[in-house]
Amino acid sequence: MNILLLVIDSLRAASLGTADDPRTPFFDELSRRWHTFTRAYATECWTLPSHMSMFTGLLPSQHGAHFQTMGYFGEPLTLAEHLTKAGYATEIVTRNPVFDPMMPGVLRGIQRRTSLLAPFPRFSPAPLLLALTKPRLRRQVRETGFFHPNQAANARFVMDFARRLLPGDALSLDYLLDRLTDLRRDHSRYFLFCNLFDVHAPYCPTEESLLEPTQSVQSLRRNATALQALALTGRHQYLEEGFEMPPKGRDLLLKRYHRAIELMDERLERFFREAEPLLGDTLVILCGDHGESFGEHGLYLHDASVFDINLRVPLWIRHPAASVESTDDVVSLRSLFDVMMRAVVGPDVRGTILDPEYRARNPVVLAEHFYYPRLPRMKAQYRKNLAAAISRRSKLVTRGMEWEHYDLLTDPCEERAESRGSMTLGLPSKDHSIARCATASLEAFRQRFGCGHTSDTRKLDLGGLQ
């Protein structure tokens, strides 16, 4: 089977399926036409580790691509490497800087990389100013030395980084339509992966600009407030002592985010209407890669968290052998690796998350977070690696050697822990199965830092947990 993987960067489940904004008629229709998972979880709260879990089937502690490595250096073959060996044409289409050749190992097995950027707008310095707030960009310029023989290359790097902030997914989707047509005409088997970036910060409110049209004094004020709030979050200041986001800034960011989701819904409706005749023999997966925070738990963007707001994402799968249904079984995005690998040999879905018996045997998913070590003023509470084990009703989080247990049925927003304690003191007996999962995940962290041993979390007996 051909494989089309579309990932909407930063699309959280919490903003879909509610009576409030955003309005998403296409996503609502997909939930009636495709196999829909309402409780899908990323393995990490940001792009690199989440994608490498989809591409290897492993947890971040196992594949090793996260904030503390910033690249994939593992031995296991990636999905694209497997598919290339099987004779597939493999291509990535995105402007997301995570999938840049400078990020080691992320593009392993990808034969073709296409990055389409919108032209830089005339008389608008806003994209450049926002780009310069990014620690990664400033570090790149500082480490290479901007004013030296590489000055021209550095200038291009800065301008390209700024252009990535402009809405450009329409270009990517138009290109995908052309590629699908060409590959079908040539009878080529393919794996096309597209990371769609317009729902990601800065949450562009129009198809053309990261600013709303300037039609009044009020719109000027909203643009100024949005740029200020985006600059605060872009510098990760929410992780520092004393941070306080103005309520107007928080509300405006959320409105921009929901507007960006609405635009994505319209864009994908047009894409699939035109692509439908080309997808008859294709496995199509559409999902988010992680969620997004707007002040929940004191956090913004996607960082320092294993809360549902940052891990729970929408997941739709169109598969010729899969039923059209909506399931609330808990599943992990890393299980997409098995779905796509199985598609290489045929339409059988047994042993994947599309198989109800498989989901019944695997009622718990694991997630992790490796903290970002380059922020010297980060609060002590964020300088801890996290692990989580999640079932339909329970969640256990480990922070260093401490644990917290949440009841997701009575407290879906995880506002208060039902119980907490130290790993050395044991856990309540009712949490035994979920505790074993989180402990195994924590042991992987210990192994990473030179102590303890790593359990194979894929082989744990997870039976008995409701």
Image: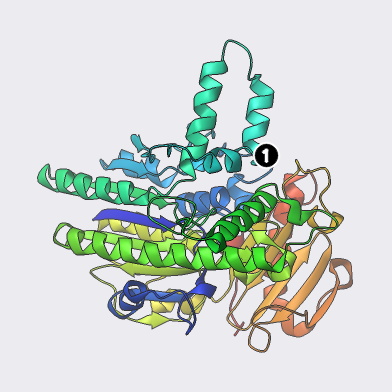
Q: Horizontally, is 348 left or right of 119 in the view?
A: left
Place of residue 257 in the rendered image (x, y in percent of width and height, measured from the top left)? 52, 64
The quadrant in which residue 147 appears is: top right
Name the residue at the left extreme: 185
Q: Is residue 30 above or below residue 337?
A: below
Q: Is residue 251 above or below residue 90?
A: below
Q: Is residue 118 above or below residue 264?
A: above
Residue where numbered disc 1 is placed? 135
Place of residue 163 in the rendered image (x, y in percent of width and height, measured from the top left)? 46, 39
Q: Is residue 279 visible?
A: no
* Mark 1 residue type: Pro
Where the N terminus falls, by quadrant? bottom left
Q: Horizontally, is 69 left or right of 12 in the view?
A: right
Helix, strand, or loop for circle 1? helix
Q: In this view of the protein, which residue sits in the foreground, 346 or 106?
A: 106
Q: Is residue 342 visible?
A: yes
Place of residue 186 in the rendered image (x, y in percent of width and height, measured from the top left)? 12, 42
Q: In this view of the protein, which residue sits in the foreground, 395 or 119?
A: 119
The quadrant in which residue 280 appears is: bottom left
The residue positioned 40% from the left and 67% from the top of the image is: 262
The residue positioned 70% from the left and 78% from the top of the image is: 414
Q: In this view of the protein, which residue sits in the foreground, 268 or 210?
A: 210
Q: Is residue 367 above or below residue 371?
A: below
Q: In this view of the protein, which residue sits in the foreground, 269 or 166?
A: 166
Where the C terminus falls, by quadrant? bottom right
Tell me the crowding category of disc 1: few under 14, some 14 to 19, or many 20 or more residues within 10 angstroms, Cα based. Answer: some
Q: Horizontally, is 48 left or right of 192 in the view?
A: right
Place of residue 106 in the rendered image (x, y in percent of width and height, measured from the top left)? 49, 39
The residue positioned 25% from the left and 62% from the top of the image is: 270
Q: Horizontally, is 277 left or right of 290 in the view?
A: left
